[in-house]
Image (cartoon, rainbow, N blue to C red):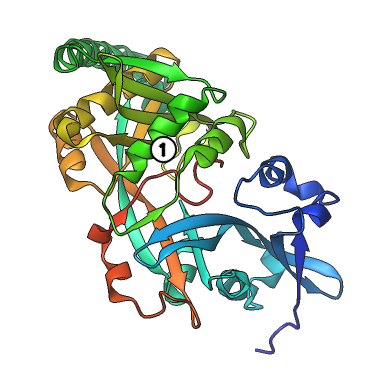
């Protein structure tokens, strides 16, 4: 088959101002603390006869490595119009992402089931984060049933069980977190954001996306979604910050291929605890899930590569439903090209909020 001729163009943040499809991305890109100016690359597009055939939005982030911190390029919303999906553009865009990066390193997170295989074919390193789910409202399940009366009866029984489970979980959680106080943090609270950033930096994994105070404030004030940005909560013991977590809420008209519709999903996206509080982490995140339940979420997810945390959640009744992901590629001329340590999941601090996932 003859390959469709495609011309590739790049657009800066400044040029993105005239892109109607950029939406909330433009506002978030303009306030990205890792972007030096509005001349930073923000979009890579392929054109066929002057018609845009596909595009990927990109933005700079920082990566912590044994070689020091590096600028990397993250991808978002990779898409190719149906009539051009045999053009090869869907493969070209993720390759161009790392080539356009100053460090020749590109990454992505929470890729779709269509985009993930493309990155695998392009030799991106892929890490999977099992998605732990707790259902707080049975409506999500029963509305897929055709018999309305049977669905209502089933919903009543299931909701009674969920209510009892959540009541018991709340009591046990409260007992395990006795002596700890959890409070929400304002994006204007610079001292606390600095303390949280310092806590994150204490994680000794050789590789990590840089989530400093600037990143925290950015994700607390910006979002690609009309459902709003992430929120940050700190955990204190006698006034000292000993942990934190971040959450987001998203409404999904179509939640999955299983037929779930009109679902409010709460996601726990970032967290860290001080070393002597590791055994409290599971209960801290459960308290976050219970808070999201109280705020009206139909379900809550915690994607995690931490096997200890995953085992804890499954032991108390959560279920794994698929997996989220994080991908990264260090191309030729990158300081990390061919680095074997980078391919090992145990060498990474992985969180669901990496890439564009905290903003999306």
Residue hosting label 1:
197
Residue 133, compared with residue 291, is above or below; it is: below
Q: Quick check: 143 left or right of 88? A: left
Percent coordinates x, y for residue 320 in the rendering: 26, 42
Task: Using the image as rendered, state which of residue 13 and residue 9 is in the foreground.
Answer: 13
Numbered marks: total: 1
The C terminus - image quarter: top right
Badge 1 crowding class, 10 Å Cα cut-off, few under 14, some 14 to 19, many 20 or more, is: some
Say whether residue 269 is visible.
Answer: no
Percent coordinates x, y for residue 137 in the rendering: 37, 20
Percent coordinates x, y for residue 146 in the rendering: 43, 28
Task: Using the image as rendered, state which of residue 6 and residue 341 is in the foreground.
Answer: 341
Q: Residue at x 44, y 25 (%)?
A: 192
Percent coordinates x, y for residue 321 in the rendering: 31, 43
The N terminus - image quarter: bottom right
- Spot the residue most to the bottom: 2
Q: Quick check: 334 left or right of 22? A: left
Element assignment for label 1: helix
Q: Residue at x 37, y 30 (%)?
A: 245
Task: Using the image as rendered, state which of residue 74 and residue 189 is in the foreground.
Answer: 189
For residue 234, which quarter of the picture?
Answer: top left
Residue 235, compared with residue 356, is above or below; it is: above
Q: Residue at x 83, y 68 (%)?
A: 51
Q: Quick check: 305 left or right of 257? A: left
Q: Residue at x 30, y 57 (%)?
A: 348
For residue 96, which quarter of the picture?
Answer: bottom right
Say whether residue 282 is visible.
Answer: yes
């Amino acid at each position: 088959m003859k390959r469709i001729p495609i011309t590739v163009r790049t657009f800066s943040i400044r040029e993105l101002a005239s892109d109607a499809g950029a939406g909330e991305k433009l506002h978030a890109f303009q306030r990205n603390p890792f972007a030096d100016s509005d001349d930073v690359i923000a979009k890579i597009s392929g054109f066929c006869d002057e018609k845009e055939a596909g595009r990927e939005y990109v933005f700079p982030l920082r990566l912590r490595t044994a070689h020091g911190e590096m600028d990397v390029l993250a991808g978002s919303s990779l898409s190719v119009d149906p009539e051009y999906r045999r053009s090869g553009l869907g493969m070209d865009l993720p390759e161009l992402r790392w080539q356009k990066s100053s460090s020749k390193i590109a990454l992505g997170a929470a890729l779709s089931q269509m985009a993930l295989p493309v990155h695998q074919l392009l030799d991106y390193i892929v890490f999977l984060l099992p998605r732990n789910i707790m259902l707080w409202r049975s409506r999500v399940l029963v509305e897929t049933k055709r018999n309305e009366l049977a669905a209502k009866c089933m919903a009543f029984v299931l909701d009674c069980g969920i209510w009892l489970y959540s009541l018991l979980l709340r009591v046990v959680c409260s007992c395990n977190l006795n002596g700890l106080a959890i409070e929400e943090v304002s994006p204007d609270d610079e001292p606390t954001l600095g303390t949280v950033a310092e806590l994150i930096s204490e994680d000794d994994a050789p590789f990590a996306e840089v989530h400093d105070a600037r990143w925290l404030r950015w994700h607390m004030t910006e979002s690609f979604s009309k459902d709003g940005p992430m929120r940050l909560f700190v955990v204190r013991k006698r006034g000292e910050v000993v942990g934190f977590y971040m959450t987001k809420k998203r409404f999904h008209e179509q939640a999955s291929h299983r037929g779930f519709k009109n679902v409010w999903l709460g996601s726990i996206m970032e967290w860290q605890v001080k070393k002597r509080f590791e055994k409290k982490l599971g209960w801290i995140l459960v308290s976050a899930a219970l808070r999201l339940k109280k705020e009206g979420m139909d379900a809550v997810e915690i994607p995690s590569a931490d096997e200890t945390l995953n085992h804890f959640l499954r032991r108390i009744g959560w279920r794994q439903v698929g997996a989220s992901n994080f991908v990264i590629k260090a191309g030729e001329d990158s300081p990390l090209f061919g680095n074997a340590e980078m391919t090992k999941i145990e060498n990474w601090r992985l969180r669901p909020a990496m890439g564009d996932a905290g903003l999306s």
